[in-house]
Image (tube, rainbow, N blue to C red):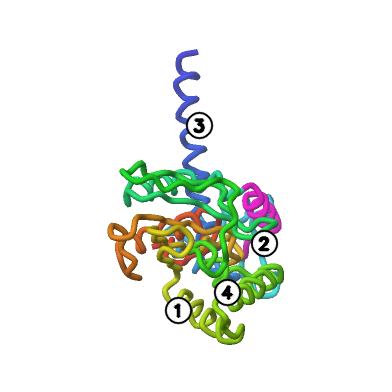
Amino acid sequence: MSETSSAEPAKQRQSIQSIEVGTRLLRALAAGRRAMMLRDIARNAGMPAAKAHRYLVSFMRMGLVEQDANTGRYDLGGFALELGLASLARLDPVRLAGPVLDDLCERSGETVALAMWGNHGATCVRWVEAGGPVTITLRTGVVLPLTSSATGLAFSAFYRSPYLKKMLDAEVRATAEARNAQPEAVLAALMAQLDEIRGHGISRASGSVTPGINGFSAPVFDHSGRMVAAITSLGIIGNFDIDWESPIAQSTREAAATLSRRLGHGSVDADSMA
């Protein structure tokens, strides 16, 4: 009995190690972005070709890998696609954003928020208060203007929706009327502003929605490259550096990039094999 029981954990450890070794081949295929020859898969996975072939045969039986009969090249199979789609379907931006927002708030000392596109526009769905001497309060469910808030400008620059365009046109007309200006002139200025935002990968606003408050907002993308949310940092004018390359701007960009990666954006990267 003692010999059998002592051998059992060793067998379990060996089985787990075998799965981990085989996964290196799947990662190599995923990073390759196209069908690959056996020698290239083996080299990228760091194992002999003969050993890699045995794993690939097993993966083919499972549907994780397929082989082109004409070229002999291997690629990810139908079951791998099913797993990937099932995993993506389970990704929840709001849930995944929690630790990212907490970390950004702690590192920056500023109030931060997550916004998503809702029925009425760019909508705050979660926020974390910094707890400084001056309270900056966001209300969950508040809809932010597209042309005057950092969050709204991020959606205006990076989000694609016919409904957004209609809302943007309406805001432009309202702004032109309030300023007694031509809508064409207001729109031209806005387009130049959005081009600048795209160039920096982040939007900014100063005291436009709430007097005395500056803000940065960076887009969050999903696995398809579509913007699905924005991460926004807010602070008091005078203590909140509005420069495009300021530490708070960089931190906000990094937080958005982190959440984007967790949502599958750019997840297949050849650098991951290094």
Callout 4–callout 1 Cβ contact below 8 Å: no
Q: Quadrant of residue 38?
A: bottom right
Q: Which residues are magenta?
A: 75-90
Against 198, residue 118 (above or below) is: above
* Residue 259 colored in magenta in the image: no
Q: Secondary structure at mark 4?
A: helix
Q: Which residue is mark 1?
A: 196
Q: Earlier in the sequence, mark 1 or mark 3?
A: 3
Q: Please give the name of the residue rendered at 48% of the width and 49% of the height, measured from the top-left corner.
A: 21
At x 34% / y 46%, what residue is drawn? Answer: 134
Q: Amino acid type of disc 1?
A: Glu
The quadrant in which residue 213 appears is bottom left
Please tell me whether mark 2 or mark 4 is closer to you in this view.
4
- Mark drawn on residue 178: 4
Within 10 Å of disc 3 (Cα), the crowding (few <14, some 14-19, many 20+) is few
Tell me the distance, in whole angstroms, between the alpha carbons under discs 2 and 4.
62 Å
- Dot 2 falls on a residue whose secondary structure is strand
Q: Which residue is mark 2?
A: 66
State which mark lies toward you, 3 or 4. Answer: 4
State left or right for residue 242 relative to residue 9. left
